[in-house]
Image (cartoon, rainbow, N blue to C red):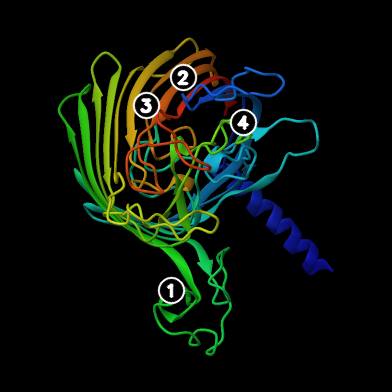
Amino acid sequence: MKKLIVLAVASLIATSAHAAEMKWSGSAGWRYNYSKYDDKLGTKTTTAPAGKNISEQFNKMENIRANIGVSGGWDSVEWGFGVRTTGNTGYNNGAIGQATANSDYRTVNGNGDLALGVEQAWFRYLRDFGSLDMSVTIGRQKNAMAFDDKWQSLFDRDVRWDGFGWNFKFGMFGLNAAQYITGAKNSAGGNAGASSYTYTESSNATAAAGTPGGVGGSQARFTMLYSVQPYMNWKFSDEIETMVAVGYYMWMDDTNTNTSGGGYKSSTLNTGPTNAAISTYELSMHNPRQLQILNTWTLPYNLSFVGELVMNKTVLLGNTNVAGYPTPNNNVDKKAGNTALTLGMTYGKVTKAHDWSVGYAFVNKGLASVIDVYTWDKHLPDNIGHHVAVTYALADNFHLGFKGHWMHEKEKVDFSTGAAYGTAGVNRNQTGQNQHTTQYELTAGVMF
């Protein structure tokens, strides 16, 4: 009994001694969102109420978000743990309310829908080799790669990754690398799921290689992202600094699809009696190979610039294999847009009370450029558009914001034929269709 008391007291003293090394952080936010989706077909109903426009759909949402985390460390080891609200406000594939990896905003309906998930659970080993600094982060973590985290065209900053993140720095040079597990596939049907799989020798060697469900396509395995990114920093003066990074991303993952038509399926609700419904098309994003060029500038007068170019391997519009979608015929050899470009400028920086900033970005995303479930939920692939963001700090760590998004679909193809938009038909794109998306957001938030 005495030993237990001594151990308890010793543990309490040790915990108190290390408490000063622990750092708590967190934030809470609120958002009001107004969205308008317009297929530009001007379709009217012919039944009661006759003559009403069904080519436009409007949506209003109120969202909340929150997160809290703690981190610490000793000697050459750091660690962190945190939880956050799990988002259900994404527009991926047009399903408002579905759980999304790229948003931690939660819709408010007073119906007990608040859910929390593990945001981070990691530890990091740091080593100094003289002029070379090295660290490896293991567990659930923020992305170890450098990317545009303002407009988030390649990766959304809310996405968390599971695996290994590596960072090396040698003076003005550096190298980032990562090995992330994105999920798993099981031999039974090749189904995608969580980062766990089960198999037997028989189940992994039953069908002929290269056939659906066979050895060539669906052996039980992890789905992975391997990436490497060298970069350089130049500091010309106290006010002028630039960074150039070149990243290569190799996905061993054939579980993702991107949606055409502006990324939103049901703007006409597919219910108009005389409207042949917007046709959307899901393109299989099998094993992308992406090259990324990132350039950021810190400039005088509180100006900053970011440019990011992403180029995926060639993807053909015939790359479908999605249940429920017609197989294209004439477009098998037609290439989908496989590049994404972001050019953004920001004036000002919000660090204390009464600071403010305003930013603008032009974003152009091809249908096959990035994987939509990992990128910014407000600008999906197959969109070209403009974004404006204004932020004002009412007090220290308390900000108000406004964001405006104006986008329209990029691909102008009838995916059933591979030709330009043609005659109206059931579940087919119509002449003149050009999905436009407009969104306005008001936000408020605190952080510590």
Query: In the image, what residue type sits under mark 2?
Result: Gly
Q: Is residue 48 left or right of residue 67?
A: right
CA separation in Å, label 3 and label 4? 28 Å
- Can residue 323 be seen here? The reply is yes
Instruction: Please provide percent x and percent y for residue 192.
Output: 54, 64
Q: Are marks 1 and 2 in contact (CB under 8 Å)?
A: no
Q: Are marks 3 and 1 in contact (CB under 8 Å)?
A: no
Instruction: Please provide percent x and percent y for residue 416.
Output: 41, 49
Nearer to us: label 2 or label 3? 3
Q: Are marks 2 and 3 in contact (CB under 8 Å)?
A: no
CA separation in Å, label 1 and label 4? 40 Å
Q: Is residue 375 above or below residue 383?
A: below
Secondary structure found at label 2? strand
Q: Is residue 29 left or right of residue 294?
A: right
Q: Which residue is mark 1?
A: 217
Secondary structure found at label 3? strand
* Disc ID at residue 404: 2
* Disc ID at residue 226: none
Q: Are marks 1 and 4 in contact (CB under 8 Å)?
A: no
Query: Which is more toward the observer, 297 or 194?
Result: 194
CA separation in Å, label 1 and label 2? 42 Å
Q: Which residue is mark 3?
A: 385
Circle nearer the N terminus (2, 3)? 3
Instruction: Please provide percent x and percent y for residue 25.
Output: 57, 36
Q: Which residue is mark 4?
A: 272
Query: In the image, what residue type sits under mark 4?
Result: Gly
Query: In the image, what residue type sits under mark 3?
Result: Gly
Q: Is residue 15 above or below residue 66?
A: below
